[in-house]
């Protein structure tokens, strides 16, 4: 069986001028958060 590659998202947080300040890369997991949401 093949292994699925993780889904990743890049989150860019900007300041008031729209200039990128922080970039965070997150990946989807099979873990559940509060309330059972992924």
Image (spheres, grey):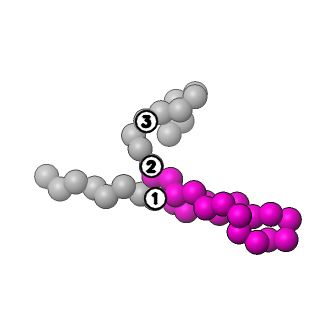
Where residue 37 appears, as percent x and y from the top left, is 54, 36
Quarter of the image for residue 13 reads bottom right
Number of marks:
3
Measure how far apart labels 2 and 3 are at the Cα level: 8 Å
Q: Residues within 10 Å of mark 2 (few under 14, many from 20)?
A: few
Q: For the point 57% across and 57% down, which residue is it?
A: 24
Whether the residues at callouts 1 and 3 have beta carbons within 8 Å, the answer is no
Measure how far apart labels 1 and 3 are at the Cα level: 15 Å
Can you identify the residue that label 2 sits on? 28
Q: Is residue 10 above or below residue 1?
A: below
Q: Residues within 10 Å of mark 1 (few under 14, many from 20)?
A: few
Whether the residues at callouts 2 and 3 have beta carbons within 8 Å, the answer is no
Q: Which mark is residue 8?
A: 1
Q: Is residue 33 above or below residue 29?
A: above
Where residue 9 appears, as percent x and y from the top left, is 51, 60
View extreme (right): residue? 16
Q: Viewed as shown, does residue 30 lie left or right of 26? A: left
User: What is the span of residues highlighted in magenta in the rendered image?
Assistant: 9-27
Whether the residues at callouts 2 and 1 have beta carbons within 8 Å, the answer is yes
Q: Which mark is residue 31?
A: 3
């Amino acid at each position: 069986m093949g292994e699925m590659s993780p889904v990743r998202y890049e989150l860019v947080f900007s300041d008031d001028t729209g200039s990128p300040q922080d970039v965070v890369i997150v990946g989807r997991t099979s873990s559940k958060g509060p309330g059972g949401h992924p």
